[in-house]
Amino acid sequence: MRTTQAQHRSTWGAGALGALLVSSSSALAAGIGQPVPWQMDRQVAVTAEAHHLHVFENWLHWLAFGISLFVLVLILYVIFKFNEKANPTPSRTTHNTMIEVAWTIIPVLILVAVAIPSFRTLRTQLSDPKADVMVKVIGHAWYWSYEYPTEGDKGGFTFDANVDEDKQPKLLATDNDMVVPVGKIVKVQVTSGDVIHSWAIPSFGGKIDAIPGRLNQWWFRADREGTYHGQCSELCGARHAYMPITVRVVSEQAYAEWLTEAKTKFAAIDNGARLADAR
């Protein structure tokens, strides 16, 4: 009888451990293009820049963990080595050249090790590659407008994107989506018509402020088709939480078809002349 109960306890314990591991892995799992319940990690990166940011961030976490562990070991060593009971006659040493040099040089080396990949990532983000697609994004209180320039017989239209509370994911879907082709460099020129907003897509690994009277520019190249969601990331007023961003990344053929349909669906805009010149 006792053997049977022990086996049941063992089985129950193994099952509980397995459930805990599964729930933990589910909690750590990241969504593709949108958040998921209990998510603890970043959304899946679909641009090279976002992937580099994730790798850099994870490396920094491990570095910080190592430094914290080292400091903890030093504190424990001092507590047990130099407490009054173990060391009744304290040392009166006030300087130690080797230690002072070490605690100056080592932090400098750590900062250099952090700066090199940081500057490399920043240089990539601030580079200005030739655009395959240009889109102007205008923030309003509280919705977004998108302008596509004229490209031959395509483009030259604008449309508004408002939150669609009947769609899923809740408060992240819009009635009209920004559409771009996969594998192409997309430049977004971002500004605002009223207050400061911020256009952000987590899966693309970046965001850029929309400031009245100023035209900011950012670029991305999505390597995976799909629908990706973001939100305004600057507290901009009463309906800040109802200002989602939806970007659909499609094939080149689907993008060309969408441009033709969109030109018919949306009103034309001054032959697309509202966009600033870009390489």
Image (tube, rainbow, N blue to C red):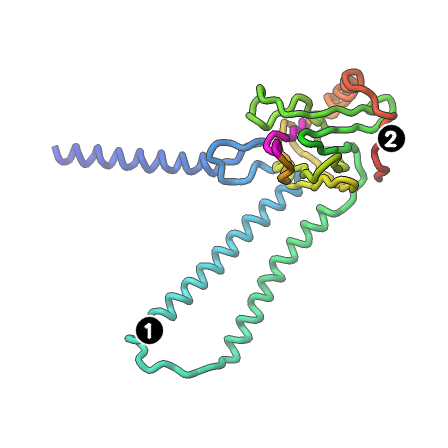
| Mark 1: secondary structure | loop
Which quadrant would residue 142 be assigned to in this image? top right
In-image side of 174 versus 39 (left or right)? right
Which quadrant would residue 223 be assigned to in this image? top right
Check disc 2 and give the amino acid type.
Ala
> How far is the residue under mark 2 from the one under mark 1?
75 Å
| Nearest the eye: 141 or 117 | 141
Pointers 2 and 1 in contact (CB under 8 A)? no
| Nearest the eye: 116 or 27 | 27
What residue sits right under mark 2 in the picture? 273
Residue occupying image coordinates x 50% and y 75%:
99
Q: Is residue 203 above or below residue 148?
A: below
**Which quarter of the figure is the C terminus placed in?**
top right
| Nearest the eye: 16 or 6 | 16
What residue sits right under mark 1 in the picture? 83
Which class describes the residues within 10 Å of circle 1: few (<14), some (14-19), or many (20+)?
Answer: few
Which label sits on residue 268?
none
Residue range in magenta is 238-248
Residue occupying image coordinates x 22% and y 35%:
9
